[in-house]
Image (tube, rainbow, N blue to C red):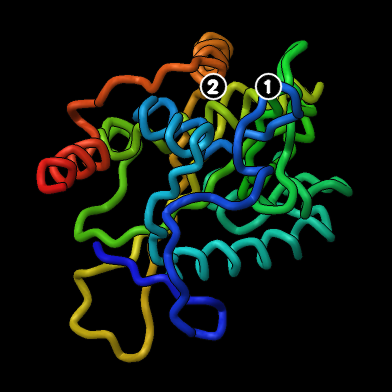
Amino acid sequence: MISINRNNKGILVEAKGKRVMKSSLYSKDNIFEISRSKFNDFLLCKRCFYLDRVLGVKVPDMPGWTLNSTVDELLKKEFDICRKNQVPHRIMIQSNLINIVPFDHPEMDKWRDALRGGIKYKYRDTNIIIKGGVDDVWFNVDTEELIIVDYKSQASFSKVTTEDYLSNVFHESYKIQMDIYSFLFKMNGFKVSDISYFYVANCRKDLKGFNSKLVFDEILVPYKPRTHWIEDKIDEMIDVLNSKKLPPFNPFCQNCACSKARAEYE
């Protein structure tokens, strides 16, 4: 899509195509934070990741997913009421998880703030901090384990099933996201459950009309996070960051293909 650059007042501002904040550019001499989403960028395309984090080439902004973020915010309000009272949420009761309550911790709001906070872990003896903003954390009162939860909203004619949801190739990034969150909490010394949940709010498309409301089915999709692969990939990412050589084109990356096609006419 074509994105036109405007400031917060809606006034057109020249697009530079380069990052200007030094904190966004990697330097091996300074502490450098890598968000969960940027780490995922590395996993998808090393070249685009290097152009962004090392050379400061900024990709066009994507529009916000306002309906999805609204569902997230409303769910957080619901769970915060249960968190304050330390009682199970309705989805826990419906799923026979009555021994689970939202985790009450003074850092909860910070962990959920992906832009200004998040849960962080300084990787070994490097200058790299891995961070991520989690949607929610639940607590198993029997095992005293934390359960990592991610809210997902979508619209589909068919009912959500665990097998279909987790086997969907377009949900691979969701699983990676959960892997990283579990890793971060473990590295911060928390006892983390080997089961996490995607709280899927599926907007029904089989109704006869809109009638000024959207109707959602809610389901918990259990997922077993895998953290064994993460450290090797962080090591690989650090090698890329410290390299003086731009990684090769990724033949499956649309950004790489677009830049290559544009160069043919310049």
- Mark 1, residues whose alpha carbon is within 10 Å: few (<14), some, or many (≥20)? few
Residue 146 location in percent, x, y? 72, 32
Taking the spot 11% from the left edge, 41% from the top edge, the residue there is 264
Q: Residue furthest bottom?
A: 211
Question: As drawn, is 39 to the left or to the right of 92?
Answer: left
- Position of residue 205 relative to residue 79, above or below, is below
Residues 10 and 207: in front is 10
* Label number found at residue 112: none
Asked whether residue 106 is in view, the answer is yes
Q: Disc 2 or 1, which lies upstream in sequence?
A: 1
Taking the spot 30% from the left edge, 32% from the top edge, the residue there is 163
Residues 97 and 50: in front is 50
Q: Which residue is mark 1?
A: 28
Q: Which residue is mark 2?
A: 241
User: In the image, what residue type sits under mark 1?
Assistant: Lys
Q: Are marks 2 and 1 in contact (CB under 8 Å)?
A: yes
User: In the image, what residue type sits under mark 2?
Assistant: Leu
Taking the spot 18% from the left edge, 42% from the top edge, the residue there is 263
Indicate the secondary structure of the residue bearing disc 2. Answer: helix
- The N terminus is located in which quarter? bottom left
Residue 63 location in percent, x, y? 39, 66
Residues 74 and 49: in front is 49
Question: Residues under labels 2 and 1: Cα distance?
Answer: 8 Å
Question: As drawn, is 260 to the left or to the right of 219?
Answer: left
